[in-house]
Image: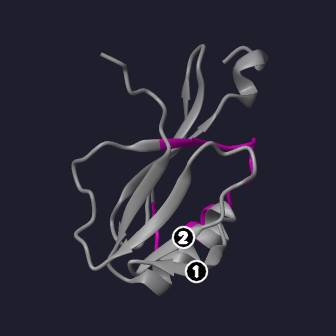
Amino acid sequence: MEHIHKLCQIEIPAVDLEQSSLFYSEVLGWLPVPIEIYQYRVLQTPPDCPYGVSLTPSQTPSRGGPTLYFEIAEDNVSWEKVQDCGGQVIKRRHRIMGYGEVSILKDPSGNRLGLFNSAKLNAGL
């Protein structure tokens, strides 16, 4: 049996598609792509991102489900923008020795997402 191991697509439930689009655009820089596929809002991820991200309308947020972590560069998240765009900071820059820093956010629909920063790993974290 062939093992399936490569993540290729992430669908994020969005109670309010416009507010969620604003959140991901302003907080992570993922601009909406001017195309609709089955009412999904496709987001433009960085060129080196190996998967696609879409917002799916009118679904319940993924409470209690898995938390996906996205790697970020050091200090490139505006915590104020998270809140201004309807999100919530749950855990901000929690240091894990020998690993890096993680932050946990909720988007406007209540979905949890993690941010991972390994930049301080070499600084003796």
Badge 2 amino acid: Val
Q: How many marks?
A: 2
**Image quarter hosting the N terminus:** top left
The answer to whether 62 appears left or right of 55 in the picture is: left
Q: Is-magenta flag for residue 85?
A: yes
Q: Is residue 120 above or below residue 18?
A: above
Residue that appears at 75% across and 29% down: 119
Out of 4 and 93, give the one closest to the viewer.
4
- The extreme front residue here reads 1
Which residue occupies 38% across, 78% down? 38
Residue at left offset 68%, top offset 28% = 118
Q: Nearer the viewer, mark 2 or mark 1?
A: 1
Q: Secondary structure at mark 1?
A: strand
Q: In front here: 72 or 52?
A: 52
Decide which of tag 2 and tag 1 comes sooner along the chain: 1
> Residue 102's image quarter?
top right
Is residue 110 within the magenta segment? no
Q: Where's the C terminus, which quadrant?
A: top right
Tell me residue 54's x, y (percent): 48, 65
For disc 2, the marked residue is 42
Residue 81: image location, x then y, percent: 62, 71
Residue hosting label 1: 35
Q: Dot 2: what SS? A: strand
Magenta stretch, residue numbers: 69-88
